[in-house]
Amino acid sequence: MAKVSIVGGGLAGCDAAWQLARAGHEVILFEMKPDKRSEAHTEDGLAELVCSNSFRATGPAAAIGLLKEEMRALGSLVMEAAYATQVPAGGALAVDRTLFSEYITAKLESHPRVTVIRKEITSLDAGELAGNDAVVIAAGPLASQELTESIMAAVGDERLYFYDAIAPIISRDSVNFDKAFWGSRWKPEDDDYLNCPMSEEEYKAFVAALLEGEKVKPRDFEKEVHFEACLPVEAMAERGEMTLAFGPLKPVGFVDPKTGERPFAIVQLRTENKDKTAFNLVGFQTKLKYPEQKRIFRMIPGLENAEFLRLGSIHRNTYVNAPEVLDESLQLRARPGFYLAGQITGVEGYLESAACGLWVGLSLARRFDDLSLKNPPRETALGALLGHLADKPDKAFQPSNVNFGLMPGLEKKMKKKFRKEAYGQRAQEAFRVWLEQVDLTN
Ligand code: FAD
């Protein structure tokens, strides 16, 4: 029987603890509440949902729906609790947050191999963490300051971030190629970029919509700090009507092949994955509310029917540059024996965090039992999410929720309405085959 300490009794920490304990290992779970709380946590229980009570869509036509199925198949405590405390929410899975947290707290506190200790861990070198076979840090996006500083000292301060500025990602198949064209500035043959040309009238209407669009109000602890390099697109628009046209939307170096002329402004989309099935809107990090993003960004010529794989956001978030600082098993390269799990790795979202914790717990348990466990293939939701943490991006590493853009593209071209289903069926089959191969029953 191995002994593992887990720091953080949130979504990731609880699913990691559950996997290890059910496999016969001893777990010490450190949770700093109630003595100390992050700015967003208010309750005493484990696995607190700090904002929405929704775990988003169900069913295989959504990547998050697939992730739910895979987590259930792997024995996730978070999924078990979610279905046990479900409240009606149409096609989504939503829970009674109090019952959800109580369910998980009771399961872990009553487990004979789990000890929950209410204490803040302030350093990777803390005495409490000594003498373990492994340590899992699952302290979340608002990890306490001293622990964050200790992680930063281990990984290097340029590899740990406190703020997220994310631009929306769009599925390539939803782009209208009657208007959009390929090429980068001065390089029309470059197929890493797509461009949406705007006339003066379209540009001015777009800027006006950005100014009027409803924005998310920052929470008290999210000071409105914006770095010049990642200003929200609407904040740039506020600086003047032409600021965007001279900034990220400048048309210099482009000729619209349809008109043979330089457009008034250009919205650039940069490829997001190897298969070029997903593109991000360059310079479009934003605090617009989600429905507003869809409404306003669909005003961009060529994006009238855009399918958003991820929407933009800017918020406080502690996460590492996973491809650089973590190995395949999510172990800190700089500190063997120390693993990260949850949002702090660079996944984004309740279930993604829980899935990440589940994976770290499960793979550690297998290793302790001298059993191998290869990663699920990239065609699956979990495999796609883990792939995101492993692949070194061309640009800066950014957190991601699970979405079809993280999976390999489909081999056959097909209409949008069939695509999601095809991704879903392929993922289910790939997961089934993987599960059979890895045989978790022994
Ligand atoms: P957490 O669930 O935050 O768990 C970390 C735990 O570690 C906490 O209980 C904390 O008290 C404890 N801890 C921290 N430091 C220490 C320490 N040094 N010693 C001991 N314990 C410690 N995602 C969604 O899908 N939907 C949403 O609506 C949503 N809203 C969010 C709102 C906010 C304000 C934030 C910050 C994030 C939100 N997220 C949301 C993103 C993310 O999914 C959640 O934060 C999720 O809870 C992350 O899971 P986790 O297990 O990684 O961290």
Image (cartoon, rainbow, N blue to C red):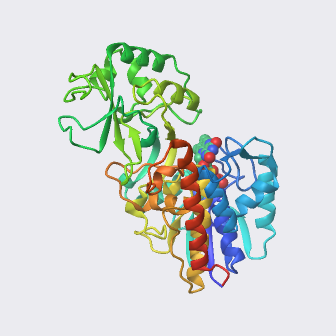
Q: In the rendered image of this protein, does residue 307 appear above or below residue 414?
A: above
The residue at 64%/67% (across/down) is 16
Task: Report if residue 120 is visible in the image.
Answer: no
Task: Report if residue 332 is visible in the image.
Answer: yes
Q: Quadrant of the N terminus?
A: bottom right
Q: In the rendered image of this protein, does residue 358 appear above or below residue 182?
A: below
The residue at 39%/60% (across/down) is 391
Is residue 274 toward the left or the right of residue 441 in the image?
Answer: left
Horizontal and vertical percent position of residue 22: 72, 75
Horizontal and vertical percent position of residue 144: 56, 52
Is residue 442 toward the left or the right of residue 234 in the image?
Answer: right
Is residue 300 toward the left or the right of residue 20 in the image?
Answer: left
Residue closest to the eye, 362 or 298:
298
In terms of image quadrants, where is residue 243? top left
Q: Quadrant of the C terminus?
A: bottom right
Residue closest to the eye, 391 or 46:
391
Q: How many marks?
A: 0
In terms of image quadrants, where is residue 411? bottom left
Horizontal and vertical percent position of residue 293: 51, 29
In terms of image quadrants, where is residue 233? top left
The residue at 78%/72% (across/down) is 111
The residue at 59%/49% (across/down) is 349
Horizontal and vertical percent position of residue 32: 66, 56
Residue closest to the eye, 252 or 221:
252
